[in-house]
Image (cartoon, rainbow, N blue to C red):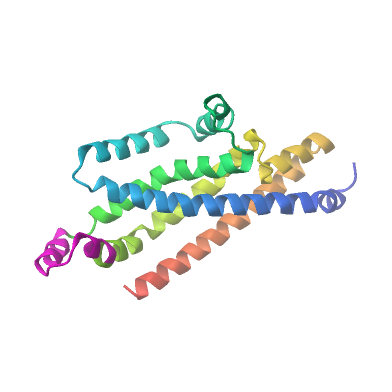
Amino acid sequence: MGSDSDLLIRYGPQLLSGLFYTVYICGLANLIAIGLGLAVALLQGLPTFPMRWLCRSYIALMRGTPILIQLFLLYYGGPSVGLRLDAVTAGIIGLSAYGGAYFAEIFRAGFQSIPRGQIEAARILGMSSAQIVSRIKIPQMLVLIVPPGVNQVIIIVKESAVLSIITVPELTKVTIRMVSETFVIIEPYIALAALFWILIEAISWLGSALERRMTRHL
């Protein structure tokens, strides 16, 4: 076993590859989760009871069970019902479905925080339900949910570490392989923590910049 610098030089390309997979999977999963969460939050507002029940059941199931179990069922249990997914696809779908439930609750809280007087005034002016949603609800709600939304994005990024269990070659999986091949523990995990910290700090900075920009234009 060589020095710390030799270790980083040797495994640097693998760590960068793992970082790429982490950014790619988390970025795509968060985008899907945000869209899914918004759709579920809007569907919950419909007067149809079966639709509301389905949305609430989805949220309760995703939030009430560990992400690791969901991934096991999706990746290892899927083939038994004819669903065969590669590890990366299963990881993206699993994180998206898991995060979508949390984003749905964030969006729902954002919608509920909008004064009802504004909605009633819009109806009096003859605006349709779609216009009320697109011109009144969503613009104001987006400003309100930026802080909890960014926090949820960060949580999904950190939860992505469990994807190593289903063989996704992301940062944690690469680090585990480094440890098993070199029998060095401290340095690889410090590098893993540092890369996650840099990634999360970048997300926090972008979230703060987005919040300032949206607040100025409100």
Image point 62% across, 43% down: which residue? 88
- Furthest-front residue in view? 82
- Furthest-top residue in view? 80
Expressed as whole percent of the image width and height from the top left, the position of residue 213 reads 41, 72
Residues 134 and 187: in front is 134
Q: Main secondary structure of the magenta part?
A: helix
Q: Is residue 125 magenta?
A: yes
Viewport quadrant of the N terminus: top right
Query: What are the residue bounds of the magenta stretch?
Result: 116-134
Q: How many marks?
A: 0
Task: Name which quarter of the figure residue 202 lies in.
Answer: bottom right
Image point 18% across, 63% down: which residue? 128
- In this picture, residue 216 sits left or right of residue 23: left
Expressed as whole percent of the image width and height from the top left, the position of residue 190 reads 70, 47
Q: Is residue 119 magenta?
A: yes
Q: Relative to 133, does residue 17 appear above or below in the rendering?
A: above
Residues 60 and 193: in front is 60
Expressed as whole percent of the image width and height from the top left, the position of residue 83 reads 54, 32
Image point 75% across, 44% down: which residue? 188
Expressed as whole percent of the image width and height from the top left, the position of residue 158 reads 56, 45
Task: Name which quarter of the figure residue 47 lies in.
Answer: top left
- Furthest-right residue in view? 2
